[in-house]
Amino acid sequence: MTLPTSDAITRAMAKRPADRFQSYDEFVMALEAARSQYLVGRFVNRTVPAAGAKTGGIKSWFRRS
């Protein structure tokens, strides 16, 4: 499995100019897409404990008790 950020950097550093991004904007878009994929994977796939569920001593920042 390759990471989107690594893929973008590898493509930007390709030996043949034809294999590189054709513009700075295209490169930036690839990096932003990689960041979006990372954030979606990090935050969307989290499960939120049910109200009143024990969290193993971990307190959320918005529920101070």
Image (spheres, grey):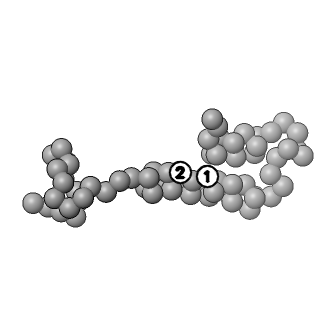
On residue 59, which mark appears?
A: none
Percent x, y of residue 49: 26, 55
Q: Is residue 23 left or right of residue 64?
A: right
Considering every residue shown, the one lying at the far bottom of the view is 62
Name the amino acid, label 2.
Answer: Tyr
Q: Judging from the image, what secondary structure is the residue with disc 2 in? A: helix
Q: Quadrant of the N terminus?
A: top right
Q: Judging from the image, what secondary structure is the residue with disc 1 in? A: helix
- Residue at 88 percent across and 39 percent down: it is 16
Q: Quadrant of the C terminus?
A: bottom left
Q: Is residue 22 left or right of residue 62?
A: right
- Residue at 64 percent across and 37 percent down: it is 2
Q: Hey, which quadrant is residue 17 in on the image?
A: top right
**Mark 1 in CB contact with mark 2 (< 8 angstroms):** yes
Percent x, y of residue 55: 20, 48
Count numbered badges in the picture: 2
On residue 38, which mark appears?
A: 2
Considering every residue shown, the one lying at the far left of the view is 65
Taking depth in this image into account, of 20 and 36 the one nearest to the observer is: 36
Count neighbours of disc 1 (C-alpha within 10 A) and say few if under 14, some if 14 to 19, many if 20 or more: some
On residue 34, which mark appears?
A: 1
Distance (Cα) linking label 1 and label 2: 6 Å
- Residue at 56 percent across and 57 percent down: it is 36
- Residue at 15 percent across and 46 percent down: it is 57
Taking depth in this image into account, of 35 and 2 the one nearest to the observer is: 2
Taking depth in this image into account, of 3 and 24 the one nearest to the observer is: 3
Percent x, y of residue 4: 64, 46
Name the amino acid, label 1.
Answer: Ala
